Image (cartoon, coloured by chain):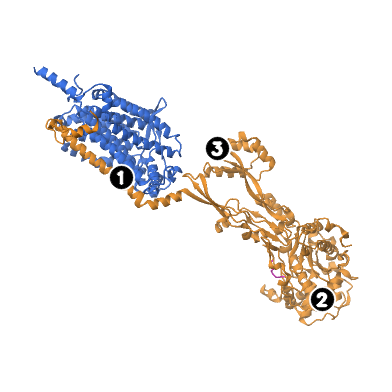
Amino acid sequence: MTVLNNRIRFHKRLLRAEPSFRLMAKLWRISWLYVLLICTLAGIGYVTLYSAAGGVPYPFAAPQAARFAVGLVLMVTVAMLPPRVLMRASWGMYALSLVLLVAVLHMGHVGKGAERWLMVGGLQIQPSEFAKIALVTVLATWFSRMNHARMGNPLWLVPPAFMVLVPVALVLKEPNLGTAVIIGGIGASLFFTAGMRLWQIILLVLPVPSLVQFAYGHLHDYQKARITTFLHPESDPLGAGYNIIQSKIALGSGGMWGQGYLHGSQGQLNFLPEKQTDFIFTMIAEEWGFIGAAAVIALLVLLIMGGMVMAIRCRNRFGRLIALGISMNFFFYCLVNLSMVMGAIPVGGVPLPLVSYGGSAMLNVMLGFGLLLSTWVHRDTRLDESGGSPA
Amino acid sequence: MGGAPMWLKRRKRDNRRLMPIRDQKDPARGIFTRRALLCMAVQVGALGELARRLYHIQINDGDHYARMAANNRVSKRLLAPPRGRIVDRYGIALANNKENWRALLMPEETTDVPGTIERFSALIPLDERDRNRIARELRHQRRFVPVMLRDFLSWDEMARIELNAPSLPGVLIDVGTRRVYPEGELLAHIIGYVAPPNESDVAHSTLLALPGMRVGRAGIEQNQDEKLRGTAGSVEMEVNAVGRVISELNREEGVPGEEISLTIDRGLQQRVLNHIGDQTASAVVMDCHNGEVLAMVSTPSFDPSLFDSGVSHAQWIEWTNNQHTPLINKAVAGVYPPGSTFKPAVAMAALESGLVSPTDRVFCPGHLDVGGTRFHCWSRWGHGSVDLHLALKYSCDVYFYEIARRIGMDRIAQTAHRMGLGVPLDIELPHTRTGLIPTPAWRQAHHHHWNGGDTIVSGIGQGFIQVTPLQLATYTARMATGRAVQPHLMRAINGEISPMANAENWPSLNMPEKYLEALRAGMFAVVNEPHGTAPKAQLDLPGITMAGKTGSAQVRHVSRALREGGHFNSANLPWEYRPHALFICFAPYDAPRYAVSVVIEHGNTGADAAAPLARDIMRDTLLRDPANHTTPPPESVATVDDSFE
């Protein structure tokens, strides 16, 4: 009887959770408003890259648009995947990301000191970008199996801690300090929202200052130089401080209303370093002024807040953590990139997601949005705490 | 069933709450919601802080950064102005700017820079100096700044480069300017030459720092350098971050240097040079009325265009070691004892002093004994009793020994100075020499005693006296017209005739006309009367006569033993010991217009060497008559003898 009742309740629940398994119904559940925001940001990227190339679609804008189209298909496809598939896939993704991180250490190409990538069939793959997504899914999978009681037991927190520390260590070895900090930040945010006890948090945070001091001692010279330059950019105007100064000049010369599209002198005259990648925000700010730049920041905030709301709204723990992790990843991207171009933190190779030119980052971001939308599509799916829906 | 609005409307039982702050059944979800909201607050706060920072940079500091942006963008460069031309009195170009074809290498346009340079040098040889310079420029310049491989390309070399263009990627030919002197050696001493500025020039003038600028190093080029330079133009260019020019925003052409017209008659200059031939000499032709120098020749000369690209060491050594001093303009920087050409000045000093009248006679036995020293006349047998006229005509030394002794050196020096001898003249040339008319005061200033004998030998233009050929010409012109004319080379600047060209602007010498007339008559006799010293100077032009004075200036002491041995003949001496031959003259005698001075170094005697040369020069001057023409006569006129018939 109980068994039967349970069965019936389960089926009711299932039906309530997933009113239809038909593909069309699932597609309908995608938040197209959110997709529209994504497309708007990518559109801004296209327009800016068009200007960065001097008013022509090549070599930046058109390939970027093509990649975005591929990314959209990838995103919608991933959004259709139910949580249990993602859970199963998460271990494989995580393992793959570690393999790639190790591979890139041994056979990767190095660009400008830090960013490392692998060439696979003509495609640049940045394992550290993929590692962030993989880490989010694997942590979400792990924590989705833990109830409140388990979270109180530190032993259950040791394995996920290693899941975070291994990629952090590998990325630090690349060496890419910025990405390592972001990966650590994402991991920390998931630990935090998964329900770590406050005393655990305090115990963890206490040794941080001494760790930072220890870490600074092990920084590469160029990384130290970045920090020094950041503190005194004018001390070396043509060297390491050049990027920050030129970036600020471009921002400042934009004023309130900007110099006009295709008329930003600093960007058009190549004073801006890496204007199509890391420093693309300065082009927007120069050509469209504070109004345009603030609008872009507002759009970024909308995307982040939307992701966070999706996380809170989700009825299953796995989806909540996925959505939060992805939003956090996106937020860190934006935070680091914008802080960098405004001279608030040292220069590091972090692009502005969807806007900066680059295929690897674009596909990773779209993969992330696919996962986010998947949690939204399956927001009412209930999963038991041992993981996976019994089916 | 739709997306977002659904969960907002639905608010049912606790366990159905969509965004539970607290969840009784699942405490972890409540914790998640609260902590996620905290995260959101942090996110909004962080991005809000960045927006605030952005506002600060873009709006509060906007003007500051906009100024920095403009500085970034606009690069102002100066353009070298074309150097002013130098022309003769008729407008014939004497110094001009010509296109200079250069081969440049754009390093970024070739993948193999050393290979390209090797292939280039196979076509057009590059010497060691070129190679070092190219290597240095390649190291220091950006890859899009062209490096000069070779300049002054000939047609033939350009053709070779063009023909092999496919194997010379990045090599291009462009045009600059170079200074050319169409007349070459003919006017080298007057025009001078230009050379690239040295470091101290550049330190004094930013204009000279511009590529292609040249500095006058001699002659008019040096003296009038400021006028010839012009004013730099400027071009404002939009440049990108690496300095590559994107577009030209604004261009202001420079003001070319001023065109300087000289008083020189190029055709006359050429004829004077022809007459001098290969003698080491200098000759000056002047307009007596206004001091215009119509011709000024100094031989041997040099090729001024060699300086524009840099003179080779061997050439320089050759020039500086040459005993004929080709680099020195002997007309203004060569100093010679004037010899007997000085006698009119002594005569004028004597007449002005009132101690001697033109009719006073002196007996010449062939020598004058003063204080136990015997001063010889050039004629061993003497001239008998001579007055001023005869003394000039015969160039009697004893007469001038005597009157010099009577009036004293100070009077002679004062008058000579007024007549233009031993004083600086206002000629527009650098490196001129003043010469010297010695005085007892000068001698004492050098801690020597002035002997009476010094005055006596000064009376015939020997001793310490030194003058330049230009001073001799000026002195002759002043005698001929009684005006204190200054010799000058500048006739017009940018077509505007100088006030110096007007004879009325020159003040009078304030010498009594009758005394001047006496000197002129004496000089007329030298040439035209029987037994004058320079019958060879007679003009063969009908109705025109000229007056002149010979001079032979000893350059070494003639000992008594040599003189009394009777075998002394200066023509047998080695060249450098022979006397200088001098001649001064003016014509036409009755209405003086032109003055000529000739100095032939070691030419032996004024009468035999200098007088005929001066005559030929004067003849050509009179035929061309540049003072009364505004266009050059056809070249044939000066050569056709019958133009006066």
User: Which callout, 2 or 3, points at the residue further toward the start of the chain?
Assistant: 3
Is residue A81 in sight in this rendering?
Answer: no
Q: Tell me, by letter, which chain the rendering colours blue.
A: A
For residue B517, the mark is: 2
Q: Quadrant of residue A82?
A: top left
Secondary element at tag 3: helix
Tell me the quarter of the image containing the C terminus of chain B.
bottom right
Image height check: is B184 above or below A143? Answer: below
User: Which callout, 1 or 3, points at the residue further toward the start of the chain?
Assistant: 1
Tell me the quarter of the image containing the N terminus of chain B.
top left
Q: Which residue is mark 3?
A: B109
Q: Are marks 1 and 3 on the same chain?
A: yes
**Magenta span of residues:** B422-426
Question: Foreground: B378 or A341?
Answer: A341
- In three-dimensional space, the C-alpha distance between marks 1 and 2, rounded to whole angstroms, equals 101 Å
Q: Tell me, by letter, which chain the rendering colours orange.
A: B
Mark 3 nearby-residue class (10 Å; few <14, some 14–19, many ≥20): some
Residue under the image location 26 percent in, 42 percent down: B44
Specify the farthest residue to the right: B530
Say if the magenta span includes residue B419: no
Q: Are marks 2 and 3 on the same chain?
A: yes
Q: Tell how many labels.
A: 3
Q: Which residue is mark 1?
A: B50
Residue B542 left/right relative to B69: right
Question: Foreground: B621 or A23?
Answer: A23
Chain of the residue on which disc 3 is drawn: B
Image height check: is B75 above or below A278? Answer: below
Secondary element at tag 2: helix
Nearest to the eye among marks 1 and 3: give it.
Answer: 1
